[in-house]
Amino acid sequence: MNGSEKRILRTYYKQVSGVAMGAHCAPAYANIFFSDGGTEMACVQFLKELNDNVLNMFLTYSCSLDSAIFLDLCIKIDGNRLVTDLYRKPTATNNLLEFQSFHPLHTRRGIPVGQFLRTHRNCTADEDFQQ
């Protein structure tokens, strides 16, 4: 190939099990799956068993008697209610869709709106949302 010819190599993957991250129904499935509750020890045991699978799917977790981190949420007990705040893993980056990509313009413009709505939905307290 000379300099003016470019060969684009693309790799495509097909998901064959589970629910895609970001799917509209994924949070509902997660809530149903984790709704059983129980003791902290039972929760840790459940998560260990969940991570023992052949699907190459593993959850990291942190839980205590007054808080838990699940996906992008920090869930805490405040009196007699649960409050949530946005959680970012220490390894998280701000890698989102490159605006110069060939995705439709409405998709690219919708990213900031979607991130704003997600943050607003995940923060119980206005102070946490503002931060």
Image (cartoon, grey):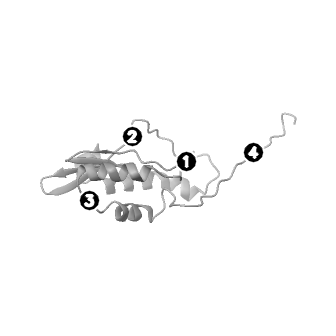
Q: Which amino acid does label 3 sit on?
A: Gly
* Closer to the camera in the image, 39 or 30: 39
Q: Which amino acid does label 2 sit on?
A: Lys
- First in residue order: circle 2 vs circle 3: 3
The residue labelled by disc 1 is 97
Q: Which amino acid does label 4 sit on?
A: Leu
- First in residue order: circle 2 vs circle 1: 2
Q: Where is residue 60 in the image (x, y as percent from the top left)?
A: 39, 44
Q: How crowded is mark 2: few (under 14 residues within 10 Å), some or many (20 or more)?
A: few
The residue labelled by disc 2 is 89
- First in residue order: circle 1 vs circle 4: 4
- Residue positioned most to the top: 3
Residue 123 visible to an observer of this rendering: no
Q: Residues within 10 Å of mark 1 (few under 14, many from 20)?
A: few
Q: Where is residue 106 in the image (x, y as percent from the top left)?
A: 55, 59
What kind of element bears circle 3? loop
- Report the Cα–Cα distance between label 2 and label 3: 24 Å
